[in-house]
Amino acid sequence: MAIYSFELDAYGNLANLGHTLREFGQKLKHIDAQTAGSMPLDLDEVHGVIVSGGGASSGASTPAIEAFVREAVKAEIPVLAIGAGSRLVARALGGEVGSCTERGVVKVSLGAGREEPLFAGQRWWGEQVVWNDECVTKLPEGGRGLASTPGAKFAAWCLGPWVVGVDWHFQSDAAGLAEATKSTGGVTPVLSAEIQRLGRLFAERVSLVFMPVDRMSAGRAKDVRH
């Protein structure tokens, strides 16, 4: 079994997140979000789902990805949504997305996320990098806001124990952070290093708490027949 990763665009590169997950023994399978033929036929080998990207969350393959996300949530498979992926997943599950522009380094306030194990060790107030042309304006039914930025009330959110959405690109490496902030003044080496440190910590929590490796070898109900 593997974590299936849908990268919506260049800003969706898993970078440090991918490296950390592999270090923890996770298997990752990249799905070309622009090629319908690469979509998984079922969920039998899916241990987790990651949807990531920057800018807009709509494209030719969006309906297929949204349908896949809904099936994964029904099957109680963890879904981690980053950047544009957060908006795509929110919309797929009944939330609403509206226009907003928030790019470069922004202030992040961790609200209810302070109490979430996945966010353990993250700063309650800090700076992160975003690349948003839209924001989640209404959460799916039952969703909870976890963090905010000046332009986004729901910069991080969750739905039950299976879905987490995060606007900022915690997965990025130094090159990705520099590229994402190039048009807004860049990011200092000190802040880049801090974002990457917090990103690796978050990635470790993803592997330990949200998509633990032992789920990959756990029996599934359909595997046993009496």
Image (cartoon, grey):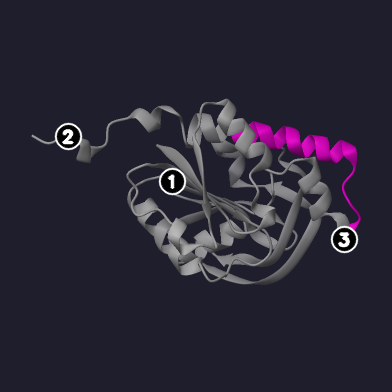
- 117 in relation to 35, above or below: above
Is the residue under label 3 in contact with that under label 1 (CB below 8 Å)? Answer: no
Q: Secondary structure at mark 3?
A: helix
The vertical placement of 116 against 97, above or below, is: above
Three-letter amino acid code at disc 1?
A: Trp
Position of residue 90 relative to residue 3, above or below, is below
Q: Amino acid at mark 2?
A: Val
State the extent of the magenta-drawn residues as a range.
183-203
Q: CA distance from mark 2 to mark 3?
A: 55 Å
* Amino acid found under the numbered disc labelled 3: Ser
Which of pointers 2 and 1 indicates the residue nearer the eye?
2
Q: Rate crowding at label 1 as few (under 14), some (14 to 19) or many (20 or more) other CA atoms within 10 Å.
A: some
Q: Earlier in the sequence, mark 2 or mark 3?
A: 3
Secondary structure type for disc 2: loop
Q: Which residue is mark 3?
A: 183
Q: Find residue 74 and report its horizontal and vertical position in percent.
A: 33, 53
The numbered mark, 2 or 1, whose residue comes first in the sequence reads 1
> What secondary structure is the stretch in magenta mostly built from?
helix
